[in-house]
Image: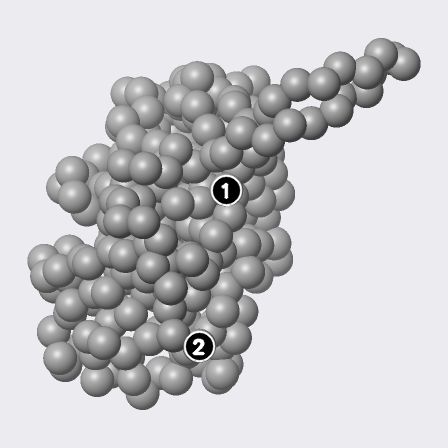
Amino acid sequence: MSPSRRPPSDPRESHAGFVRRPIRRVRAGHVVELTDAIAEEIPVALVYNDRPHVVMMATPRDLDDFALGFSLSEAIIGAANELSAIQTQTLLEGIEMRLRIPESRAAALETRHRNLTGRTSCGLCGAQALEDAVRQPPRVGTGPSIDATILHRALEQLHDRQPLNVATGATHAAAWAHLDGNVALLREDVGRHNALDKLIGAMATAKERADDGFLVVTSRASYEMVQKSATVGIALLAAISAPTALAIHLAEETGMTLIGFARPEGHVVYANPGRIMRIAEGVHA
């Protein structure tokens, strides 16, 4: 089926990430008719050097960040400057992003045979070989050492930095905090791995160094979240929910500090606790 064009628009400007829909709210026996904000979830196709690669279900905002971050976290490119062009068009079926990378990278991508459709909650859907699904990133570097109170400071800032989730209650966030605990960048999406890819793209554009901060995500620490983070050199990942066993294993193998159940009042360390200074010193953090 040939694609049908929507009216010309730039999705980076025209999409707030949510739409307004009429709803009927029932609480304590009272019925109220009103309009609510609903998070958007649409197909976003990434096409590298005119070769379709992946269709992800994502929230249509910060899409340039998404394209760059996905390209980096999936090791399609090795540096941000290898992504030389992004052309975005809005179709009736969704959004298509045409990306230009070095031909050697495109040829290597072709051999991976990872053309797939990614559901919102799935970062590995459709991988055709085990080595594609369980890709082993290199070990992370020394990374930051922080006091536990620094981690908790970042967690306390998350709510006010998530306007899309405040409006809809339906999105995840990935945040980059500096070593003083202040959140420098945050991106949101209905998919946790999409939010992380958007953040990685934003970090690359802002030239943030992996050793200069740490990552906080408002989701569970699943395998692909550790994999994507380690691929770009992030050495400390904190999630507000639990990790999976495979995520812990990968964190151990790559040298990443993995934290789960992160709350302003406490957290659990699952791998490589030495970067949390109070734990390294034998003091309960």
Looking at the figure, which quarter contains the N terminus? bottom left
- Give the camera-side residue of 279 and 243: 243
Q: Residue at x 35, y 83 (%)?
A: 112
Does the image show residue 232? no
* 252 horizontally vs 91: left or right: right
Q: Residues within 10 Å of mark 2 (few under 14, many from 20)?
A: few
Q: Is residue 18 left or right of residue 47?
A: right
Whether residue 82 is visible: yes
User: Which residue carries the number 2 mark?
Assistant: 1
Number of numbered discs: 2
- Between 87 and 8, the one nearer to me in the picture: 8
Q: Which residue is mark 1?
A: 40
Q: Residue at x 25, y 56 (%)?
A: 88
Residue 82 image offset from top left, x and y in percent: 12, 63
Nearer-the-camera pick, 110 or 175: 110
Residue 139 vertical placement versus 26 (above, below): below
In contact (CB < 8 Å): disc 1 and disc 2: no
Q: Amino acid at mark 1?
A: Glu
Q: Secondary structure at mark 1?
A: loop
Q: Secondary structure at mark 2?
A: loop
Could you say which is closer to the camera, residue 4 or residue 12? 4
Amino acid residing under circle 2: Met
Q: Residue at x 42, y 58 (%)?
A: 92
Closer to the observer: label 1 or label 2? 2
Residue 177 vs 255, above or below: the answer is above
* Residue name at image x 27 percent, y 27 percent: 184
Left or right of residue 84: residue 93: right
- Crowd around label 1: few <14 · some 14–19 · many ≥20 (10 Å): many
Farthest bottom residue in view: 111
How far is the residue under mark 1 from the one under mark 2? Answer: 24 Å
Label at residue 208: none
